[in-house]
Image (tube, helix red, strand yellow):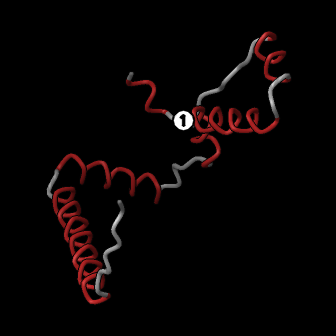
Amino acid sequence: MSKTIEVPVTLIKKLSKATRAFQELEDELEDFLLFSDPEFLAKMRRSRANHLAGKTRPVDDLKKELMYRIETTPDFDKDFKSLDREVALRILKKLDWLSQQKFLDSL
């Protein structure tokens, strides 16, 4: 049997305020740790110097480098065409997501 419990608005507001405070603390701690790391600072300085020197490239080039290219076989194409439209769209969405996941290189 399910029960309904009413939580006072004041309690929700306090919880929300505490959550925001914790997130801010977490962000500040992350900033502190990053800016205490000499290797990170050196990378940031090099990146800034390269940017100021005009050593940049189009973001589309970077995207191409970081994305996978998915190729299908004739059998896949044939089977895919026979799928329900809704199912096919879900598969296409997943394949698009998969093509953008560079983390797979570490598997």
In the rendered view, tell whether residue 53 sits above or below residue 75.
below
Give the amino acid at mark 1: Leu
Q: Which residue is mark 1?
A: 66
Which of these two is toward me, 87 or 28? 87
In the picture, measured across the screen, residue 16 lies left or right of residue 61, that is left
In the rendered view, tell whether residue 6 sits above or below residue 4.
below
Q: Residue at x 32, y 54 (%)?
A: 44
Q: Residues within 10 Å of mark 1 (few under 14, many from 20)?
A: some
- Rendering coords of residue 48 (x, y %): 39, 57
In the picture, measured across the screen, residue 80 lies left or right of residue 5, that is right
Which part of the image, by quadrant, shows the N terminus?
Answer: bottom left
- Rendering coords of residue 22 (x, y %): 21, 71
In the picture, measured across the screen, residue 100 lies left or right of residue 105, that is right
Q: Residue at x 28, y 76 (%)?
A: 20
Residue at the bottom extreme? 10
Count of numbered circles on the image: 1
- Rendering coords of residue 37 (x, y %): 16, 52
Residue 100: image quadrant is: top right
Residue at the front extreme? 1
In the rendered view, tell whether residue 100 sits above or below residue 14.
above
- Rendering coords of residue 87 (x, y %): 73, 34
Which of these two is toward me, 52 or 44? 44
Q: Secondary structure at mark 1?
A: helix
Q: Residue at x 43, y 32 (%)?
A: 103
Q: Residue at x 26, y 69 (%)?
A: 23
Which of these two is toward me, 68 or 6? 6
Which part of the image, by quadrant, shows the C terminus?
Answer: top left
Which of these two is toward me, 52 or 47? 47
